[in-house]
Amino acid sequence: QVQLVESGGGLVQPGGSLRLSCAAPGRIFSSYPVSWHRQAPGKQRELVAVITSSGRTDYGTSVQGRFTISKDLPKNTVYLQMNSLKPEDTAIYYCKLEFRGYEIWGQGTQVTVSS
C-alpha cells in the first residue's frame, strides 16, 4: 500500500517562507500526478498546486506567483515552496497522489502564518 508522508509545516510570520515535503516509496512520482491541497477551518479543501508525471505544473489563483511545486525523483519527494506567506495561507496542507484510479492522501501538515 502506498503511503504519503508530509513534513515541513510550522509557524511562520507574514512574508516568510516554508517548504513542505511529500515523500513516498519507490519512483511512483515519475509516473503519476501529485497535487497539494489545503483546508482552513470552516472552509472547503482547495487545490493549491499540481505537478504531472511529465513535470508540467499548475497553481490555484490565490498562490500563483508565490508558491512553487517541484519534484526530486531520486529522493522520491515532491516539494511545495511557499514564499510571501499571508495569514490567509493558514491551513492544513495535504499532498495527494492519483494512482491507478485511486486518490491517496497524506496525513496533512499544519501551516500557520501569524505575527
Image (cartoon, grey):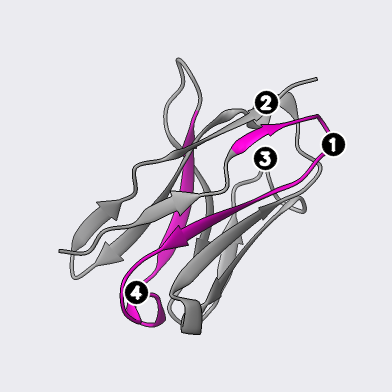
Q: Does the magenta stretch include residue 26?
A: yes
> Is 83 colored magenta in this rendering?
no
Q: Is mark 4 on a helix, strand or loop?
A: loop
Question: How far apart are labels 2 and 3 at the CA level?
Answer: 10 Å
- Residue 59 versus residue 1: which sits nearer the camera? 1
Residue 1, position in %: x, y?
Answer: 15, 64
The residue that disc 3 covers is 62
In the rendered structure, the answer to whether residue 42 lies left or right of residue 14 reads left
- Mark 1 or 2, nearer chain start: 1
Mark 1 Cα-neighbour bin, 10 Å: few <14, some 14–19, many ≥20: some
Q: Mark 2 points at which residue?
A: 88
Measuring from the top left, give residue 94's x and y in whole percent.
43, 44
- Point out the stretch of residues depicted in magenta: 10-39
How far separated are the C-alphas under marks 2 and 4?
Answer: 30 Å
Circle on res. 32? 4
Say which amino acid is labelled 4. Answer: Tyr
Q: Which residue lies furthest to the left in this view?
A: 1
Q: Nearer the viewer, mark 1 or mark 2?
A: 1
Q: Left or right: where does residue 56 sit relative to residue 87?
A: left
Alpha carbon separation for disc pair 1 and 2: 12 Å
